[in-house]
Image (cartoon, helix red, strand yellow):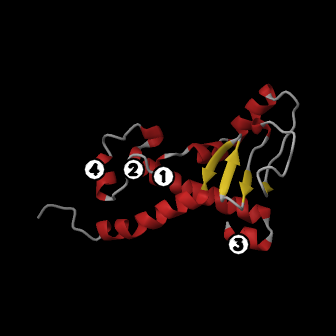
């Protein structure tokens, strides 16, 4: 993502964003199950990794927006009053005036580190910090013997 920003390459940025969100969603699915359906069963895993129930890694909404983009586009087309459409934006959140939140799809504000989709803000720095915190814990946990002798 940062390489895309540094190079002024939106396609590279958004490809990186998609990959990052897929990776964090996989962590979420491992720790809570798809849609949180295995939250209770996976509690011991979260505890061993020191992941709180309110971890930013638990939320997969943004990844779902990106992954099910076609469904969001269909819904927008049916519901949008003016059929204004903005996508693949990198810049301040107020860089395009006169649009409703649901007319704005993928928007990244470099000043905040937020990806905004349909007016919902998701903090990339918060997700990065959660992954960076998790990594050394997961490495140590993976080195423990988890079998009975």
At label 4, counting other C-alpha atoms closer than 10 Å, the crowd grade (few under 14, some 14-19, many 20 or more) is few
Give x and y (percent) for residue 97: 86, 44
Q: CA distance from mark 1 to mark 2?
A: 9 Å
Secondary structure, mark 1, is helix
Ranked by sequence position, the earlier of labels 3 and 2 is 3
Q: CA distance from mark 2 to mark 4?
A: 9 Å
Q: For residue 139, which quarter of the picture?
A: bottom left
Return the residue nearer the eye: 18 or 56: 56
Per the image, the residue denoted by label 3 is 3
Q: Is the residue under label 2 in contact with that under label 1 (CB below 8 Å)?
A: yes
Secondary structure, mark 2, is helix
Q: CA distance from mark 3 to mark 2?
A: 29 Å
Q: CA distance from mark 4 to mark 1?
A: 16 Å
Give x and y (percent) for residue 142: 31, 67
Q: Is residue 114 left or right of residue 131?
A: right
Task: Classify 47 as above or below 145.
Answer: above
Q: Which mark is residue 57?
A: 1
At label 1, counting other C-alpha atoms closer than 10 Å, the crowd grade (few under 14, some 14-19, many 20 or more) is many
Per the image, the residue denoted by label 4 is 44
């Amino acid at each position: 993502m940062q390489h895309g920003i540094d190079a002024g390459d939106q396609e590279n940025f958004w490809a990186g964003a998609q990959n990052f969100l897929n990776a964090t969603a996989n962590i979420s699915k491992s720790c809570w199950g798809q849609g949180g359906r295995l939250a209770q069963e996976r509690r011991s895993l979260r505890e061993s990794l020191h992941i709180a129930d309110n971890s930013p890694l638990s939320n997969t909404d943004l990844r779902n927006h990106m992954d099910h983009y076609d469904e969001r586009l269909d819904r927008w087309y049916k519901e949008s009053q003016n059929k204004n459409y903005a996508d693949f934006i990198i810049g301040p959140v107020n860089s395009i005036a006169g649009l409703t939140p649901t007319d704005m799809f993928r928007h990244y504000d470099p000043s905040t580190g937020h990806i905004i989709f349909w007016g919902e803000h998701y903090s990339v720095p918060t997700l990065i910090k959660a992954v960076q915190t998790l990594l050394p814990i997961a490495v140590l946990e993976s080195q423990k013997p988890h079998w009975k002798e």
